[in-house]
Image (cartoon, helix red, strand yellow):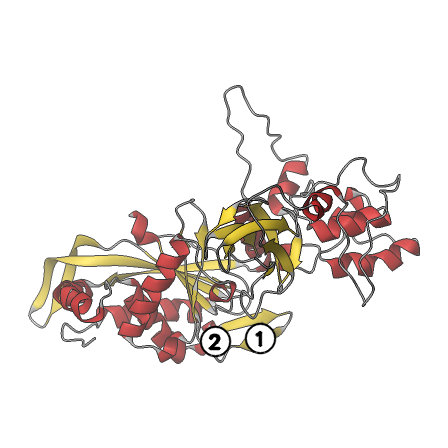
Amino acid sequence: MSQIEILLPKMGESVAEATITKWLKKPGDAVAADEPIVEIATDKVDSEVPAPEAGVLSEQLVKEGDVVKVGQPIARIGGSASAPPPSAAKAAESPKAVPATNGHAPTAPAPVMASAASGPMARTGPSGKFYSPLVRNIAASEGLSMAELEGIAGSGEGGRVTKKDVLNYLPQRQGGKAPAIAPLPVAAAAMASSGGPSLVSAPGDELIEMDRMRRLIADHMVMSKRTSPHVTSFVEADVTNLVLWRDKVKKAFEQREGEKLTFTPVFIMAIVQAIKEMPMVNVQVDGYTIIKKKDINSGMAAALPSGNLIVPVIKNADQLNLVGLAKKVNDLANRARSGKLLPDEVAGGTYTVTNVGTFGNVLGTPVINQPQVAIMATGAIRKKPAVIETPHGDLIGIRSMMFLSHSYDHRVVDGALGGRFVRRVADILEAWSLEQAF
């Protein structure tokens, strides 16, 4: 059987590389067509690479922890289920080559200089920053210490230090200039300050290392709070008609469309309508410049079985009707839970909704999903006694009520706009007709 190279597949327009996180097959293992052989991770989602056809994994061309470009060979299939070929063993023993830069051929990394930390450089620094294998290789070959890496301001996702950042720093270092020390994350800064707590684990405490996705979430949340002054407005909406309508049509909807009808697509439809009327909520901020987004791309926060959170995005949500939104919501939610989302499907959002009512929560104060400037949380729908205004006087009745929470960036969204927006969404939901077509 001829050798077949397995390339790192294209994972979306916004993704150029991925980290090899775990090999599921080792050289000599038989693999079936479409069987996953390796797990990979990008800054957005984790995924698997399947075998293009059945055979035997004869060689792994990259190691766990390596950062690989899209289209780069990562493995070969072919041969028989025997010991791996010598080339595979040599690859495992030989030092990792630094990928070519500026058109030059790859070279083996130089020995770590005395100024660098002894032993292999850690993947994560004291501040919690993650350093890719490529960055660590360059740092090792140039004799950079972890302290120096920590001081380089990163331009990557969540402040990650990239190859470009390190290469830009080297001339300054050689010229005797020290980099501006990047501030610690808020949590780390609080720990390091004299007034912060000094955490010491007690006997019986369990120490749990954050997984990669939880670290990304933590960094993103801290960054959002540091970037945007958050303000939250609340309204309570009477959604009795909406609840009655859904109860009436959900069975027919599922029979006709083959999809379950949840409240989420209705919430997104109401938010999209409000954005059309108040487009200054659908913006981003670049310094003192406001970028008014043409597209309305609705993010929908989804909880994963691992306990982590991901936000798939419905692109051009304003161009979909209720059926289209329902299908998109169900598809993205199902593939999010099974880890099948593509990187482009969690990028490009302009406004996000999170349904905290799914967990029985009455309301929440969500953190803005940067670089957006607003996010809405929908609370649990509960039956409550409420005042009903009629032409003949006020009455007390049992109504289905829910809270909407709207968190917004007070740099560009003032209380008047933020408050009117959430009130408008509530009005749209309250006016839902029992005869609404789908």
Question: Looking at this rendering, what residue extends furthest in the top direction?
Answer: 203
Quadrant (top left/top right/bottom left/bottom right) for the N terminus: bottom right
Badge number at residue 7:
none
Q: Is residue 377 visible?
A: no
Query: In this figure, which residue is indicated by the disc labeled 1?
Result: 290
Q: Is residue 287 visible?
A: yes
Dot 1 or dot 2, earlier in sequence:
2
Q: Amino acid at mark 1?
A: Ile
**Residue that appears at 57% across and 54% down:** 78
Q: Judge from the rendering whether residue 260 lies leftward or rightward of residue 290; answer left or right.
A: left
- Residues at marks 1 and 2 touching, judged by CB atoms closer than 8 Å: yes
Per the image, label 2 sits on a secondary structure element best described as helix
Residue 410 appears at what percent x and percent y?
Answer: 52, 64
Quadrant (top left/top right/bottom left/bottom right) for the C terminus: bottom left
Residue 239 vs residue 293, the one in the foreground: 293
- Image: 145 above or below 265: above
Q: Judge from the rendering whether residue 294 lies leftward or rightward of residue 173; answer left or right.
A: left
Query: In this figure, which residue is indicated by the disc labeled 2?
Result: 280
Residue 148 vs residue 339, the one in the foreground: 339
Mark 1 nearby-residue class (10 Å; few <14, some 14–19, many ≥20): few
Between the C-alphas of marks 1 and 2, the distance is 9 Å
- Image: 273 above or below 418: below
